[in-house]
Amino acid sequence: MKLSGRTAIVTGGSRGIGRSIVQALAKEGAKVAFVYRSNKEAADQLVSELELDQREVLAIQADVASSEEADRVVKEVIEKWEKVDILVNNAGIIRDGLLATMGPEQWQDVITTNLTSVYNFCHAVVRPMMSARYGRIINMSSVAAEFGNSGQVNYAASKGGIEGLTRCLAGELARRNITVNAVAPGFIETDMTTDVVNAAGDQIKKQIPCKRLGLPEDISNAVLFLAADESSYITGQSIKVDGGLTLGGI
């Protein structure tokens, strides 16, 4: 198994893309702690599923928007497993609406949950990773970071910020054998995208050269590659996993 002996933290890990990432990392031998906000039932179900498969997994309830909570999560994982090798910043929300009618809360909730949480957890793991001279940090971006959608100024801004953070942090940490990359999904079938997909119907698929929506496994496979030693010479990149949606001119 590619990740045998490694330990990982995944934020937003109880459902959707995060759940798929937790499963993929655990099945490749990593010890995985995942953070969830409120859905304890989903978190417990995932733990039970992976423990039946003889995987080491830990569910931690925390608010990713809090730097103190991020510090607590990292401390708990290090106390249990002695180190953190892999961090996947996956937690995210959408609060869509046109800017003219977007209230401050709609803006701040998305920026805090999507972007500030990435700072919080990167800040919490960076010193332990530097001391170990090893690390893999993978941040969840979106094609919206580069190709904006009407009604998503808050979401696009948060994801653009993540990509800027990823590039800068990659330059700071490369000499310590720590890579920092982002994965930018297109339209993926999850609970969070259900309303968008239902509203657009088959029109979305017509815009995608692969003629299908992505699956959570399409994203977790990319994360798995970036978490493994085979990707050690890739850093500061944002990898689009979108079925060709952003190619343009097709």
Image (spheres, rainbow, N blue to C red):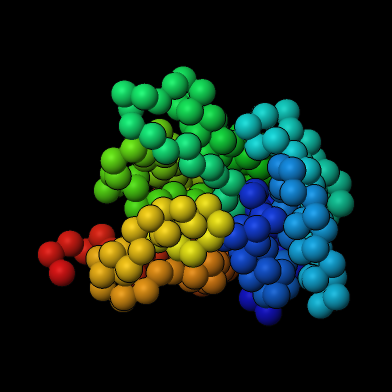
In depth, the one of 62 and 233 nearer the eye is 62
How many numbered marks are there? 0
Q: Quadrant of residue 29?
A: bottom right
Instruction: Classify 64 as above or below 207.
Output: above
Q: Determine the residue located farthest toward the top in the rendered image.
A: 104
Instruction: Classify 244 as above or below 35.
Output: below
| Residue 178 drawn at (x, y percent) | 55, 52
The answer to whether residue 53 is seen in the rendering is yes
Instruction: Classify 227 as above or below 174.
Output: below
Q: Residue at x 33, y 27 (%)?
A: 99
Quadrant holding the C terminus: bottom left
Quadrant holding the N terminus: bottom right
In depth, the one of 9 and 107 nearer the eye is 107
Q: Is residue 34 left or right of residue 192?
A: right
Q: Determine the residue located farthest toward the left in the rendered image.
A: 249
Instruction: Classify 107 as above or below 22.
Output: above
| Residue 242 drawn at (x, y percent) | 36, 64
| Residue 163 drawn at (x, y percent) | 40, 44
Q: Residue at x 78, y 43 (%)?
A: 61
Q: Is residue 191 left or right of residue 39?
A: left
In depth, the one of 162 and 4 nearer the eye is 162
Q: Is residue 223 left or right of residue 196?
A: right
Q: Residue at x 77, y 64 (%)?
A: 46
The answer to whether residue 169 is seen in the rendering is no
| Residue 55 drawn at (x, y percent) | 81, 71
Q: Residue at x 30, y 44 (%)?
A: 149
Q: Quadrant of residue 70?
A: top right
